[in-house]
Image (spheres, helix red, strand yellow):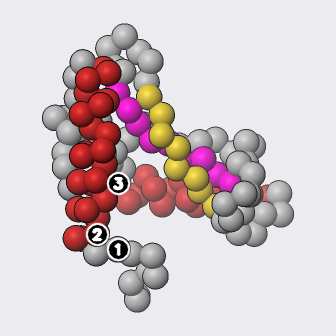
Amino acid sequence: MPKPEKCITVAEARNLQNNWIASRAQQIENALGNQDTREVLWSLEELQEYLDYIKEESEKTGIKNPGVRVYFGAYDESDNDRATVFFAPTKGPENNDENNYDISPFNVGNSGWPPYSY
């Protein structure tokens, strides 16, 4: 299988993470009074199951090429105020395609603590 077109190099990934840490991590820590999550992990099996679910549910309504949007979020529980991300199905792969609110979003990954840097 060829490498997907949108893959980036390890150096580019490290640069993105370092830019995030340099431009946001300290401000978030100052605002919260503690470090925040900076990565979320799912198994390939979990992700594939979700992608298959999106594809199947989309096809039922005539959507042939759905997309997935990644949103930043934060828990508001008394014992967990950390950041998270969640996946939201869309009705297509373009920037302005609507979210598909008929298909459930996906969350509840794992996160290293203290934050795991790339």
Q: Assign a secondary structure to mark 1.
A: loop
Q: Secondary structure at mark 2?
A: helix
Residue at the limit of the structure toward the left, as seen here: 114
Q: Where residue 68 sits: x, y (%)?
A: 59, 56
Please give the name of the residue rendered at 37% of the width and 41% of the height, measured from the top-left corner. Answer: 109
Amino acid found under the numbered disc labelled 3: Ser
Residue 84 versus residue 48 in the image, above or below: above
The disc, 1 or 3, on the residue closer to the chain's N-terminal end is 1
Q: Which residues are magenta?
A: 82-90
What residue lies at 28% left-to-right and 69% top-to-bottom?
12
- Residue pictured at 16% horizontal, 35% vertical: 114
How far across and how far down the image is residue 74, in percent? 44, 28
Is residue 115 magenta-colored?
no
Cβ atoms under marks 2 and 3 closer than 8 Å:
no
Contact between labelled residues 2 and 1, with CB atoms less than 8 Å apart: yes
Residue 25 visible: yes
- Looking at the rendered structure, which numbered label has been put on residue 12? 2
Instruction: Give the image location of residue 69, x and y in percent.
Output: 58, 53
**How far apart are the alpha carbons under marks 1 and 2?**
6 Å
In this figure, which residue is indicated by the disc labeled 1?
8
Task: Indicate the position of residue 95 as horizontal and vertical percent values.
Answer: 66, 60
Numbered circle sitting on residue 43: 3
Classify 10 Å Cα crowding around label 1: few (below 14), some (14-19), many (20 and above): few
For disc 3, the neighbor class at 10 Å (few under 14, some 14 to 19, many from 20) is: few
Residue drawn at x 37%, y 10% is 78
Lower position in the chain sequence, tag 2 or tag 3: 2
